[in-house]
Image (cartoon, rainbow, N blue to C red):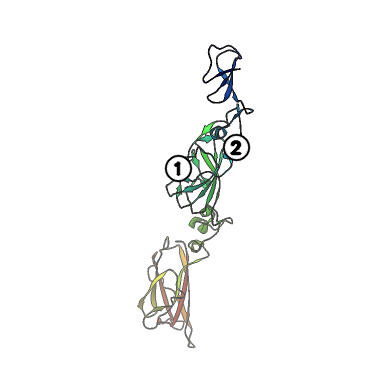
Amino acid sequence: MLTASAPVSPTYPFLEYYNTTDGKRYRRNAANSAWIDLGLVDSLGNSATVAQILAGTDTTSFGTPDSIAALWQRGTDIASATTLSLPSTGGRVFNITGTTTINGIGSAVGGTCLKLKFVSALTLTHNGTSFILPGAANITTVAGDTAEFIAEGATDAISSNWRCFDYQRASGSPINITDQVATQANQETGTSVTTVVTPGRQQYHKSAMKGGASFDATGVIAIATSSDYNISSITDNGVGDYSANYTTAFSATTARFTTCSRENNVSVNYYAELDNARARTTTAQGLMAGQNSGGTRNDTNYYEFGTFGDQ
């Protein structure tokens, strides 16, 4: 066999020689137009590089355990950046360090899957084409969160379009828990059986009291703070004449109704009701109290009311 440190000349079809520079054998093709790499003399063929394994398109080289490990092993940590750069040394499992907002991931062969673990809090920015996130919404990571992405390209095609097909919070809570929480509209409609109600939204249901209090009107009006809700103050307009002032206004003057009750520790019948003579507003309600006998107004040592309606 011919031996040379560079391709020999002249050539003819099927000519073979050994290259002393790279230790490989080469054979001329049938058309005598190019050399065919036959691999190392002391091996069965050409071993694939990590880059070739990651590209997945070479058909003339074979993989070694070390190069194939690039498809699944943990790679070097990746610093967060606008576009994450995948290490040329391979790996499919990475820690993401830093707090820079991430808008995408570098190119890879279609079908490539990545497993990422976030070391710090940062923002993942949803893009409907190149960086598709669950719920089509941005994600703010928490240390310990993990995500899995797949390159959206076709077989053997290079793609920089990625889809997150799994995201796990370190806490175990759902990623888009807000999708499962009742809105004000859900509460006002009152028909959903698939959403959960939070403390800040429960009062919007039509069955919930939107305001109320109990107070002593003898002397200076004193509200029982343990029982009041959405009441900023009670105005004393005169004997047996009060106004309840709401902290959060109602949507309209007709969008509510109020119930009243009154007690005195004496053997006299009393009444407690709305004061229709006093103009109702979205932020105030007139109340009055008095004796049933003769309709005489007087102050009470205990008056309570509750208001329902739309806010």
Q: CA distance from mark 1 to mark 2?
A: 29 Å
Which residue is at a point 56% across and 25% down the rendered structure image? Answer: 23
Amino acid type at image mark 2: Ile
- Position of residue 254 measured from the top left corner of the image (x, y, whole percent): 44, 63
- The furthest residue to the right: 44
- The first of marks 1 and 2 along the sequence is 2
Q: Is residue 62 left or right of residue 299?
A: right
Q: Which is closer to the viewer, label 1 or label 2?
A: 2
Asked which quadrant contains residue 28, the reply is top right
- Position of residue 70 measured from the top left corner of the image (x, y, whole percent): 57, 39
- The furthest residue to the bottom: 267
**In the picture shown, does residue 118 fall above or below 257?**
above
| Quadrant assignment for the C terminus | bottom left
- Position of residue 226 measured from the top left corner of the image (x, y, whole percent): 46, 76
**In the picture shown, does residue 218 fall above or below 308?**
below
**In the picture shown, does residue 40 fall above or below 130?**
above
Residue on which the image places disc 2: 68
- Position of residue 211 measured from the top left corner of the image (x, y, whole percent): 45, 69
Count of numbered marks: 2
Residue on which the image places disc 1: 103
| Quadrant assignment for the N terminus | top right
Residue 154 visible? The answer is: no
SS state under label 1: loop
Which residue is at a point 49% across and 54% down the rendered structure image? Answer: 143
Amino acid type at image mark 1: Asn
- The furthest residue to the left: 237
Label placed on residue 252: none
Task: Depth check: give the residue in front, 180 or 144.
Answer: 144
SS state under label 2: helix
Q: Is residue 189 left or right of residue 286?
A: right
| Neighbours of disc 2 within 10 Å: few (<14), some (14-19), many (20+) | some
| Neighbours of disc 1 within 10 Å: few (<14), some (14-19), many (20+) | some
